[in-house]
Structure formats: structure tokens, C-alpha cells
Amino acid sequence: MQVYRELLSRADGVIICTSEYIKGVPGVLKNALEWLVSSAELYTKPVAVITASCDGENTHQALQLNLSMLNANVFDGGALLISGANNKLNEYGEFVKTRLIPH
């Protein structure tokens, strides 16, 4: 855990990209954020959030709420929801025909 916190402390910013799991933040990611509650590694640090999933709206909102509780700075234009991600991949796993919804 110390290495995790040190890496976050030294980072100029953080990009979090996730999918949705049962209409929420995947447990491993939620747990990783919860380990930071008693510390200041994300305090005012610029954070970009990308949610790419079948729907993703609930996860996208929940993740931003979790980050706000950690006083992370999800800056204006730093949140992106890609709904229907499973239908927007080509045979190489690259996104195509994407209508991006900034949040």
C-alpha cells in the first residue's frame, strides 16, 4: 500500500478509466480509492475519469462522487462517459463510431 500511495503522491495527475460492474464502480477500484480516505494523495490533484461500458452512467456518477469525497480535482472537461462501448469496437479492439458524452 505504501508504494501505491507514494506513486500517487508523486504523480502530476491521475487518469482513471473503468468499466461498469453491476451498475457500480468495480470493487477493486472502489477498494483502491477507499484506501486513500485517511490520506491526502489525491487532495486537489487533477484527475480525469473515463467510463466505458454498456451503460456506465451510474458508475460514472458514483466514481466522481467518490473522488469528490477525496477532494480530487476532476477538472472541467476531465470526465468522459462512453456508453455502449461494447458496440463501438472494431476487430482490433479500437473504438469506432463513438459518440462521446462529456460530463
Image (spheres, rainbow, N blue to C red):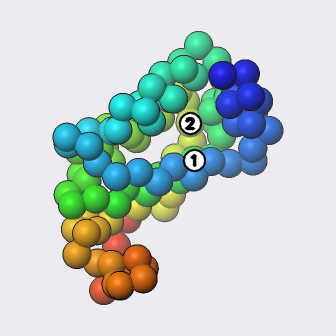
From this view, report whether residue 88 is shown above or below residue 83.
below
Few, some or many residues within 10 Å of mark 1 (<14, 14–19, 20+): some
> Mark 1 falls on what kind of element?
strand
Q: Position of residue 57 (x, y in %)?
A: 24, 51
Q: Which residue is mark 2?
A: 72
In the figure, is residue 40 to the left or right of 58?
right
- Which residue occupies the extreme front position in the image? 91
Q: Are marks 2 and 1 in contact (CB under 8 Å)?
A: yes
Check disc 2 and give the amino acid type: Ala
From this view, report whether residue 82 is shown above or below residue 96.
above
Q: Which residue is mark 1?
A: 47
Instruction: State which quarter of the image contains the C terminus.
Output: bottom left
Which residue does the image show at 29% across and 48% down from the upper left? Answer: 20
Check disc 1 and give the amino acid type: Val
In the figure, is residue 73 to the left or right of 95?
right
Which residue does the image show at 33% across and 78% down from the upper left? Answer: 89
Which residue does the image show at 33% across and 38% down from the upper left? Answer: 25
- Which residue occupies the extreme right position in the image? 10
